[in-house]
Amino acid sequence: MVLSRHPVSAAMFMIISLVGVAALFVLLESFFLAVLQVLVYAGAVMVLFLFIIMLLDVGPGASKINFSNWKTGLIGFGASCLLIFLLSALLSPGEDTLSFGQSWTVINNSTAPAPVDALVFSTDISAFGYALMTKYMLPVQISGFLLLAAMIGVIILSKRSGTPSSNS
Amino acid sequence: MALSLLFLPFVSALVILLFLRAKGNLASLVSVFTAAGILILSLLLLFNSQESSLVWNTTWFTMGSWELRFGILLDDPARLLLFIVSFVGLLIHIFSLGYMESDPARPRYFGGLSIFMFSMIGITLADNLIMIFVFWELVGFSSYLLIAHYFQTDEASQASRKAFIVNRVGDFGFLIGIVLTYWTFGTVNLGELADLADFSPSLITTGLCLALACGFIGKSAQFPLHVWLPDAMAGPTPVSALIHAATMVAAGVYLLIRIDFLFTEQALGLIAFLGAAMGLYAGFCALVQRDIKKILAYSTLSQLGYMAAAFGLGAPGLALFHLTTHAFFKALMFLGSGSVIHACHHEQDIFKYGGLRKRMPVTAGTFLIGVLAISGVNFLSGYYSKDAILLWAYNFNLPIFTLLYAGALLTAAYMFRLYFIAFEGEARSEHSQSAKENSLSMTLPLVLLAFLSVLGGYVILYPFNIGSYFAPDLSATALLPHHMWMVVLGTSAWIIGLVVARKLYAQVNQEDPLSRRLPGFFEICQSKLFFDQIYSFYVNKIQDPFCRFMEVMELLFISGLMVRGSAGVTALLAMLAKACYIGRVHAYAFWFMLGTLGFIIYSSGIFE
Amino acid sequence: MLTVTPLHFLILAFVLFGIGFLGLLIRRNILLMLMSLELMLNGINVALVTFSRVGNNLDGGIFVFFIMTVAASEVAVGLALLVALYKKRKSVFTDDMALLKN
């Protein structure tokens, strides 16, 4: 996706990636999140992207990638350094890293220690909802406000300003 | 009470300069009453303190462990000078009432007079060198203010600047002297210095007292800083009388007397020689001048040389005595010349006068008394003081005596010349034809001063212990040998001068007869030994390029390197920072990533 | 057959993040930069869900929930800004937006 020429193809690849991520969620037994992923991301966000691509009529020449710039090369090198560094930090054996060597067992008798006052993992949506409404009530309300603010912001941003130059 | 004496003229100056700028009459009356008040207060002070001296001081400000004291020391010389300053000052204030009555800038003038009285009394009463220095500068400033009274003319403004700058050069030496004194003795208080005074002379102490004497040289216009006094005659005549005849130039001699315990043999010898040389040199210059005030200015220079010579010979009491009598008759002559100038509508060339004796009898009579006094005519005040100096010089230092005696001859010559040309003969111009005697406010001081010029030599008459400072020296003089011979010499001096003057100058026209008879001599005397030319050469050719060089250095280093350099470093840093703020998002991401990388590396614990 | 350990999931998450980051840096079209941002967020989501599963913890999942919310609103606002910017500058390339340059 990041290297494709036409932005529409980039969007298509993005949708495939998102669906793939949803599949990963299913593998990790958080089914609610998988569905949520498809609905919200692949369904709403990508559609929005496609709308904008169509609106702005961004053609195939729009995806020029700046390879000639040496700075880009440096950036890429730095990004990979970051990556490698993080990976090595993860792989190095330490006391409180997770035991990666073993696969996890079935849910019911997992040997990983659960932190105190944490919610126990379950695949039920009701558990999810319970957690949302009790422990995470404040973030829920705040995200409500956030969505409201985003909506208002979008409306204002897309208002037609009174100057004649905005007529495209 | 001494404090109120000191600050009364200061208050009067403030009042005049702040509130009375437009009201000339009121300002002059305030000033005159202040002068009268000063006289009354000083008489009270002198009357009350029958004991030897009055000492009082307080701390002005402290800087760490060093403190500057502000104090009053009223001992014998201070008493005498206080009396002179207040008395002559009052008379001159009264004279100014008449002289300046048609001048529109009277408040400025009287305010300046009040400031001058304040600073002069400050010098008189001060008890430590730094306080003297402060008031010294103030006196210089008030002299600058008053000389530039007619500042619309080029001559006056340039003269005032010259006076101030030359004075300042002397003060620089004075300041170095104060620093050296503090460094050597640890104190600048005159009383404490007197206690420390018995020390063996060394290079430092000689240099120290010579440096302090630089103040005297600047203020009292001795060689080589004498060039400002003749030019200072551009100020109003009462100013010349007060400042440049009786008091400010006497402040230099007063300073010497205050620190006379510091002087070493060599320094005294040098000062005596300088003084005697000045006495002679000024005499030559005065002989060929046309302007009446300049003649009197050179005569002041000459008499100051006498005082310096007396001091250098080891008789400071005689110097102070001569200062007293000189104050009387010189002020008298200056005021007399002022009266003449006023009557002849500000004409100052003596060759345009003539025959004034018939028209202005009081002025002529008092002026004659002044001339007789300065020439040393017997039994007048000048005779006593001058001949005492000559006797002392004859006994102790013959070369100096020769110089002084020649000076005395010249004094008599030029003074009588002035009298004959100005007051005798026929009127030579229209102004002097129409001259008439002035009002009482101008003639009364003349009469009073003439009275004092006659009687000022009789020390017994001095009330309230004023004369106690020079009594010892005078009694010592009385015991010196060659007394009669000196009387003969002194009398012959003034008689010779009178005869010469009568022969040369009794009948003159518009030009000086000496220029016809002895043209070469006349030329040399007129050139004043080229001092002005030397100084202007120095200023223009040496000092100006140096100043320009310093200016270039300053531009280059201080404003260029340091000021704009530091601004440049800041600008460089700003440019570096600005390079991060281009609008490209990728650059921002780049910097963000670098920062994150750095943070991760740091938090991984490598640097602990 | 290779057992799938949490490490593999994490590696995948990091790879997703890295690809998204690379795309963000390389692209000059703002639209595609925003898409790369979404990809980065998805990578984070995977990592979080992995930790949630391994730690037997529902907190990770709820965090993912909120991330999704925020990401959605962020995309909406970002695209609205982009449209407004396009109306002004008639272009969606960052080169034309660099007003602070020099």
Image: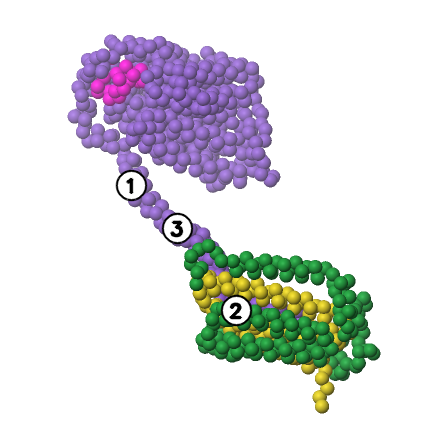
Chain colours: A green, B purple, C yellow
Residue closer to the observer: B599 or B497:
B599
Q: In this view, does A123 lie above or below B450?
A: below
**Picture disc at residue A52:** 2
Figure quadrant of residue C74: bottom right
Q: Is residue A36 above or below residue B561?
A: below
**Is residue B111 visible in the rendered structure shown here?**
yes
N-term mark: 3 or 1: 1
Q: What stretch is highlighted in magenta?
A: B337-357
Residue density around tag 2, few if under 14, some if 14–19, many if 20 or more, within 10 Å:
some
Q: Which chain carries label 3?
A: B
- Tell me how far mark 3 sits from mark 2, CA to CA: 62 Å
Residue closer to the observer: C4 or B529:
C4
**Picture disc at residue B537:** 1
Q: Mark 2 lies on which chain?
A: A
How many discs mark residues in the rendered view?
3
- Tag 3 near tag 1, CB within 8 Å: no
Q: Residue furthest right?
A: A109
- Tell me how far mark 3 sits from mark 1, CA to CA: 26 Å
- Report the amino acid beneath label 3: Leu
Q: Is residue A151 above or below residue B529?
A: below
Residue density around tag 3, few if under 14, some if 14–19, many if 20 or more, within 10 Å:
some
Residue at the disc numbered 3: B555
Classify the position of the N terminus of chain B by image quarter: top right
* Picture residue at 49% right of the left edge, 25% below the top: B122
- Residue C49 colored magenta? no
* Picture residue at 48% right of the left edge, 61% below the top: B578
Q: Is residue A114 above or below residue B481?
A: below
- Report the amino acid beneath label 2: Ile
Residue closer to the observer: B123 or C13:
C13
Of badges 3 and 1, the one in the foreground is: 3
- Report the amino acid beneath label 1: Phe
